[in-house]
Image: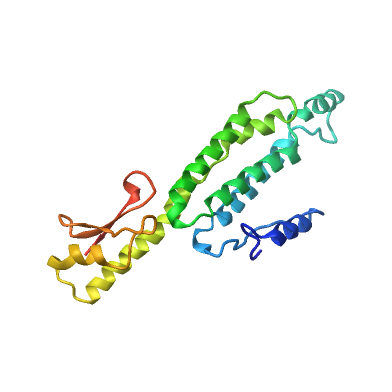
Amino acid sequence: MIGGGRGAFIGAVHRIAAQMDGQAELVAGAFSSDAERSMVRCIVGEWMFVSELLEDMASNYRAGEDATTFDRVLGRLSRPLMQLQDSKNRTADHYWAVARTLEAPFTHYEAALRRADELNERTTDEAATFRIYNRVGVAGLANLSSFSTYAARVSDIEGTRRAVLLAATLRASGTAAEHLPTTVASAELRTPYTDRPFDWDEARGAIVFRGLETGERGEHVIYY
């Protein structure tokens, strides 16, 4: 599917219509104008995986043709504990809310990651509430993800790209090492999140971009 991302009305209509008879499924799409950062593509794949798991779980609450009378009675009594459609709906709602939250510009992306984590916490709290109807399906919501770690990693690619491009441009222009601190500080290529200059690490002789991913993986060192 092409289009139908955040703010698009007709995309949702087409998705609903295509799946009404159960003969079609959404397997891929480009939903964002910034396709490289669109987390919808990733989340759709995760939704398909979880959807299959839910169907397998629900099948355990349905008695087969060769089931005994006891198994059939037990299956009917326990069926309210695992409602497939309700489970799918709740999972889809969570994933779509996460996807919309992560469709944010670079300058607001750190805040978007926090909101995604907060949304995931609310979903986890909902999973912990006691209920009889679809108890098993709702409990499974606690295993869903906010995708914030992966989203930060994907988003950091843009900062790394800019840092690499800056290093390549400076090398091509023959910029002397003693001029690099001031040249990097005044360069048009800047970090995507704050629009501030990249750091110049004199000791390592490198341009450094510190992204949103935590830990060592969030530091990207481009040696000059």
The vertical placement of 144 against 36, above or below, is: above
- Residue at the spot x=58%, y=30% of the render? 125
Q: Nearer the viewer, residue 91 or 111?
A: 111
- Residue at the spot x=31%, y=63% of the render? 163
Asked if residue 90 lies left or right of residue 80, the reply is left
The vertical placement of 176 against 217, above or below, is: below
Q: Nearer the viewer, residue 68 or 190?
A: 190
Asked if residue 1 lies left or right of residue 37, the reply is right
Label count reads: 0
Asked if residue 38 lies left or right of residue 214, the reply is right
Asked where in the image residue 51 lies, by quadrant, the reply is top right
Q: Position of residue 137 (x, y in %)?
A: 68, 33
The vertical placement of 218 against 38, above or below, is: above
Q: Is residue 24 visible?
A: no
- Residue at the spot x=73%, y=33% of the render? 60
Q: Residue furthest left?
A: 178
For the C terminus, give its image quadrant: bottom left
Query: How was the colour assigned to the protein in this rendering?
Result: rainbow
The vertical placement of 21 against 130, above or below, is: below
Q: Position of residue 21 (x, y in %)?
A: 82, 54
Q: Is residue 224 visible?
A: yes
For the N terminus, give its image quadrant: bottom right
Asked where in the image residue 32 lies, by quadrant, the reply is bottom right
Q: Nearer the viewer, residue 146 or 70?
A: 146
Q: Position of residue 107 (x, y in %)?
A: 43, 55
Q: Position of residue 47 (x, y in %)?
A: 63, 48
Q: Nearer the viewer, residue 61 or 134?
A: 134
Q: Residue furthest bottom?
A: 173
